[in-house]
């Protein structure tokens, strides 16, 4: 309430007439111009004070409900329980409460006492609203809910709702056997059956409802056809629930789980879940890795060997037999000398099959093909085959099978991956430049092609280390510096030198190009968005690049398979554990990528390129270039 008081004049005594009051107000220049609309009062004997106020609001209803919810506890069928709430009027006016009833979703066991259509609650008084719960019988669910609702003329509230809860007390006691059911091993395409028994061990009837397989259960579990999802058990009665598991999915995991679920009127186990489990016996499942074997270039009158790993991902042992080379294969393919032609592969185990290729035939075509065949012991796939291929290389020389390296000071060496040893050929290359070596590649004739930091390309004799200038023109198509590697395509017999680079060693993206022989002309192929790599072929037409962190677009050391026709990224493997930057080189030899970073040596298996392993050091050499010809062994 707002009250405004203004002093309007000074008087020698109590004013007698309102007209005199108005005159004084006028003389005092009062701000109120129409004083006849205000209720005026005299507020002081010595000062004439005009007091006016806004009218008071009428008294209103203000209710308070206690308690705010009702819980009836457990109530047996045929009996009842009553609970009540007090509705107190804390306002200054009467409260009118109407109508009093139950919410539309309330259980039928709840009821309100008969009340007049409107209950009047005077100020300071209260009214009691009673509710009863009288269950007619015991059924699922035992927990029941409802709401008491009414309206009042309390302007601060709308419809008042008081939540109601109750449970039904029963004499049902269920015994369930077994508590969990395991079907054990079930052969693929077979069905195993079982059952769960529910017995009423109490003195009153028991209801079971909602019988079903719980959400998330494997679809191969089922409940017997015709089984009711709801039934009542008299005391000592038994219901046997038939269940089954039909094994149709051979995919892993072979261990499958589910749950049989239902609700009951047993107050101690109102909700029941019975775990179900089964193991699908898929028998023998034989796998072969790799799926094909390419021996790459094998020098005439030399041999190469490779292994095919047979693994068993099934649940029964595989009885492998008839291991051999298909009669239609080239005569150069044979099994290893001590290779068994029959053996057992246990579940989860593996067995290697050794295959050899002897390059004894120099007649074209030089591309040779064959097939490894065997009987798997798996009834669903009794036979398996692995394609074999090799290229008889009449151009390669023996010296072209090694890895050659050059360090930042020009030390030119031969590296033996089998012993991790270096054999120095010369302590410093005598190439006519003041720059340091940058990268290197080796061709099938064991000639090393060494690029220097000024972009020049030199020929180096791998037997003597003698360096010779070439007609290569530096900076063609913006490739001032570059990594390089030869890629051999066994389907065409073509050996191609690829280079990748740009203005510097960290150009991103870099440019992929080829170098023609003998012209040494550079032909662009496309951008390599992954970074600026060192390159290597793998003898099967594939092109790979290695990027240290400072030359990689991702900032992580990476091994990337590159499309030789476009430069696009085809596969990527990153190595967070390799954080070194600096001098680096990479080449493929004997089934592994050999990576040199500063004075460290790492290797990555072609069959598992996600893992990188430190294997040794370079004895102080900071390798900047490595070269391996496509005549090097692939396995």
Image: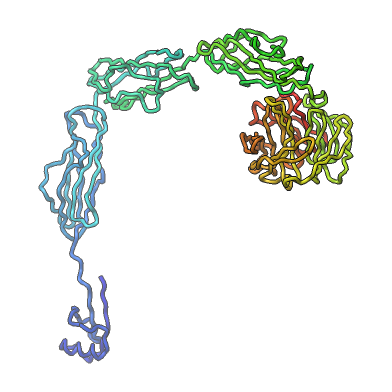
Q: How is the image coloured?
A: rainbow
* Residue at the spot 72% in from the left edge and 20% down from the top edge: 366
The location of residue 367, given as percent across then percent down, is 70, 20
* Residue at the spot 35% in from the left edge and 24% down from the top edge: 213
Is 124 situated above or below 223? Answer: below
Residue occupying the far left of the picture = 116
> Where on the picture, by quarter, is residue 437?
top right
Image quarter where the C terminus lies is top right
Image quarter where the N terminus lies is bottom left
Is 8 situated above or below 394? Answer: below
**How many discs mark residues in the rendered view?**
0
The location of residue 532, given as percent across then percent down, is 69, 42
Which residue is nearer to you in this view: 483 or 140?
483
* Residue at the spot 66% in from the left edge and 8% down from the top edge: 340
Which residue is nearer to you in this view: 565 or 96?
565
Is residue 264 visible to the viewer in this orientation of the structure? yes
Is residue 492 left or right of 621 when viewed as pictured?
left
> Where on the picture, by quarter, is residue 452?
top right
Is residue 383 left or right of 519 when viewed as pictured?
left
Is residue 6 left or right of 321 when viewed as pictured?
left
Is 220 situated above or below 62? Answer: above
* Residue at the spot 70% in from the left edge and 12% down from the top edge: 331
Which residue is nearer to you in this view: 204 or 148?
148
> Where on the picture, by quarter, is residue 338?
top right
Is residue 548 visible to the viewer in this orientation of the structure? no
The location of residue 363, given as percent across then percent down, is 75, 17
Which residue is nearer to you in this view: 112 or 190?
190
The location of residue 168, given as percent across then percent down, is 24, 30
């Amino acid at each position: 309430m707002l009250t405004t008081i203004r002093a309007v004049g000074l008087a020698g005594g109590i004013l007698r007439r309102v007209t005199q009051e108005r005159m004084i107000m006028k003389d005092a220049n009062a701000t109120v111009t129409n004083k006849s609309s205000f209720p005026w009062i005299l507020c002081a004997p010595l000062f004439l004070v005009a007091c006016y106020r806004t009218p008071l609001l009428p008294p209103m209803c203000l209710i308070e409900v206690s308690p705010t919810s009702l819980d009836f506890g457990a109530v047996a069928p045929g009996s009842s329980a009553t609970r009540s709430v007090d509705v107190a009027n804390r306002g200054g006016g009467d409260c009118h409460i109407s109508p009093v009833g139950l919410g539309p979703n309330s259980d039928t066991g709840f009821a309100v006492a008969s009340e007049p259509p409107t209950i009047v609650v005077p100020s300071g008084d209260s009214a009691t609203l009673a509710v009863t719960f009288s269950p007619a019988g015991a059924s699922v669910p035992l927990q029941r809910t409802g709401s008491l609702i009414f309206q009042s003329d309390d302007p601060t509230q709308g419809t008042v709702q008081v939540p109601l809860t109750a449970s039904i007390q029963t004499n049902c006691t269920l015994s369930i056997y077994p508590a969990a059911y395991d079907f054990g091993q079930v052969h693929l395409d077979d069905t195993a059956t079982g059952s769960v028994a529910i017995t009423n061990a109490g003195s009153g009837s028991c209801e079971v409802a909602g019988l079903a397989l719980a959400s998330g259960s494997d679809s191969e579990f089922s409940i017997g056809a015709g089984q009711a999802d709801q039934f009542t058990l008299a005391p000592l009665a038994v219901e046997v629930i038939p269940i089954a598991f039909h094994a149709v999915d051979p995919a892993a995991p072979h261990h499958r789980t589910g749950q049989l679920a239902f609700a009951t009127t047993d107050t101690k186990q109102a909700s029941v879940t019975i775990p179900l489990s089964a193991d699908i016996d898929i028998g023998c499942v034989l796998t072969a890795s790799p799926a094909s074997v390419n021996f790459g270039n094998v020098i005439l009158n030399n041999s190469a060997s490779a292994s095919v790993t047979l693994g068993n991902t099934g649940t029964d042992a595989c009885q492998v037999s008839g291991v051999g080379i298909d009669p239609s294969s080239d005569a150069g393919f044979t099994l290893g000398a001590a290779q068994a032609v029959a053996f057992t592969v246990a579940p989860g185990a593996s067995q290697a099959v050794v295959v050899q290729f002897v390059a004894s035939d120099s007649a074209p075509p030089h591309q040779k093909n064959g097939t490894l065949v065997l009987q798997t012991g798996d009834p669903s796939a009794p036979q398996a085959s692995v394609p074999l291929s090799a290229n008889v290389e009449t151009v390669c020389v023996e010296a072209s099978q090694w890895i050659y390296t050059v360090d930042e000071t020009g030390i030119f060496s031969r590296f033996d991956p089998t012993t991790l040893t270096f054999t120095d050929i010369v302590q410093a290359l005598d190439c006519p430049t003041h720059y340091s070596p940058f990268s290197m590649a080796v061709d099938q004739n064991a000639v090393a092609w060494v690029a220097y930091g000024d972009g020049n390309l030199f020929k180096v004799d791998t037997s003597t280390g003698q360096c010779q200038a070439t007609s290569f023109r530096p900076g063609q198509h913006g490739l001032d510096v570059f990594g390089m590697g030869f890629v051999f395509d066994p389907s065409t017999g073509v050996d191609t030198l690829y280079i990748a680079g740009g203005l510097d060693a960290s150009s991103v993206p870099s440019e992929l190009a080829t170098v023609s022989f003998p012209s040494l002309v550079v032909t662009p192929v496309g951008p390599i968005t992954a970074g600026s790599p060192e390159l290597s072929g793998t003898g099967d037409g594939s092109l790979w690049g290695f990027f240290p962190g400072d030359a990689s677009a991702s900032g992580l050391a990476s091994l990337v398979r590159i499309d030789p026709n476009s430069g696009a990224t085809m596969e990527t493997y990153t190595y967070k554990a390799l954080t070194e930057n600096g001098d680096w080189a990479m080449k493929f030899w004997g089934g592994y990528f050999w990576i040199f970073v500063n004075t460290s040596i790492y290797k990555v298996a072609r069959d598992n390129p996600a893992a990188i392993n430190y294997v040794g050091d370079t004895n102080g050499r900071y390798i900047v270039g490595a070269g391996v010809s496509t005549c090097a062994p692939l396995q």
